[in-house]
Amino acid sequence: MARKRTGTSKSALVFGGSRGIGAAIVSRLVADGYAVAFTYAASTDSAHRLVEEIDAGGGEAVAIRADSADPAAIRTAAIKAHEHLGTLDVVVVNAGIMRLGTIEATSLDDLDLMIDVNVRGVFLAIQASLPHIADGGRVMTIGSCVAIRTGFPGSSVYQFTKAAVAAMVKGLALDLAPRRITINNLQPGPTDTDINAGALEALSDKSPLKRVADPAEIAGLISYLARDEARYMTGTSLTIDGGFTL
Ligand code: NDP
């Protein structure tokens, strides 16, 4: 599914933009004046609906099917985004999965898939996008507050994948600095998305503010990091969790 660019000045690529936090980031970047390409893996209907909504609102969006567990698909997605939008100003790597299970209950397939999507997929998405990002551009990753503290059993694999992302951006910040490209990692707390289906009430109870985040609140921080005034921030992880990890 594709729309040709019609003159919007800034462009962005969001890996994992069909639902939840990723969809909120896509919508926010469009509202901020970006033409946005985003990837999805399974949620074809949601991806199509999002493009239609953006289209109806006068914005520009392109949905690209690309499984973040598949290195070739990631590379192709970056090339397609560049073909549609030209040089990219902003890349956000949001695609992530959570399979909870204690160490006894974790299968090798689940372990590999979480590493492939949440860690390898993040690195490869940035690597594939890099030739298409403007000097001075912005890269953001979506980690998680569980990189700091998890507090519940069965989260070890998800937790270490998100801790790996926080570590990854530090080294990448140094790799990207010569081109003045910054990279920062957002660590959301519990947010109202499908990933927390069935757990929202319990998570709200555990939160100091007695609620979970709205995806738009996470997208607001992406919007800030994309701005020129955020240009001196790089290699850092920003936790936005309503005090959940305090
Ligand atoms: P959702 O499950 O609601 O959405 C996940 C998004 O990522 C979807 O657009 C999905 O697309 C995409 N995605 C998942 N797997 C792949 C894949 N293999 N290839 C391409 N795209 C993929 O999750 P959230 O919105 O809640 O989470 C988004 C990010 O935020 C994740 O990295 C998550 O770990 C992180 N996070 C979430 C928190 C929360 O409380 N919600 C808290 C902290 C961090 P599709 O459906 O098309 O596969």
Image (cartoon, rainbow, N blue to C red):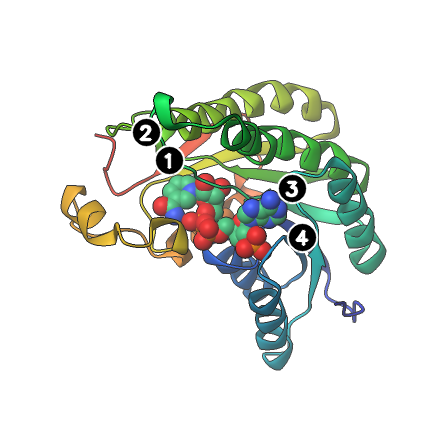
Q: Are marks 2 and 1 in contact (CB under 8 Å)?
A: yes
Q: Quadrant of residue 234?
A: top right
The residue at which mark 1 appears reads as 100
Q: Nearer the viewer, residue 91 or 38?
A: 38
Find the distance from the CA under tag 2 to the CA under tag 1. Answer: 5 Å
Q: Amino acid at mark 4?
A: Ala
How many other residues sit within 10 Å of disc 4, few (<14), some (14-19) or many (≥20)? many
| Coordinates of residue 63 in the picture (x, y in percent) | 68, 62
Instruction: Kindly state the secondary structure of the residue where label 1 is placed.
Output: loop
How many other residues sit within 10 Å of disc 2, few (<14), some (14-19) or many (≥20)? some
Query: Which quadrant is home to the C terminus?
Result: top left
Q: Nearer the viewer, residue 64 or 234?
A: 64
Instruction: Kindly state the secondary structure of the residue where label 2 is placed.
Output: loop
Q: Quadrant of residue 50?
A: bottom right
The residue at which mark 2 appears reads as 154
Image point (74%, 36%), residue name: 71
Q: Amino acid at mark 1?
A: Leu
Q: Are marks 4 and 2 in contact (CB under 8 Å)?
A: no
Find the distance from the CA under tag 2 to the CA under tag 3. Answer: 23 Å
The residue at which mark 4 appears reads as 12
* Mark 3 CB near ligand 1 (8 Å cut): yes
Indicate which label's residue lies in the foreground, 4 or 2: 2
Q: Amino acid at mark 3?
A: Ser
How many other residues sit within 10 Å of disc 3, few (<14), some (14-19) or many (≥20)? many
74 is higher (above) or lower (below) than 40: above
Find the distance from the CA under tag 4 to the CA under tag 2. Answer: 35 Å
Indicate which label's residue lies in the foreground, 1 or 4: 1
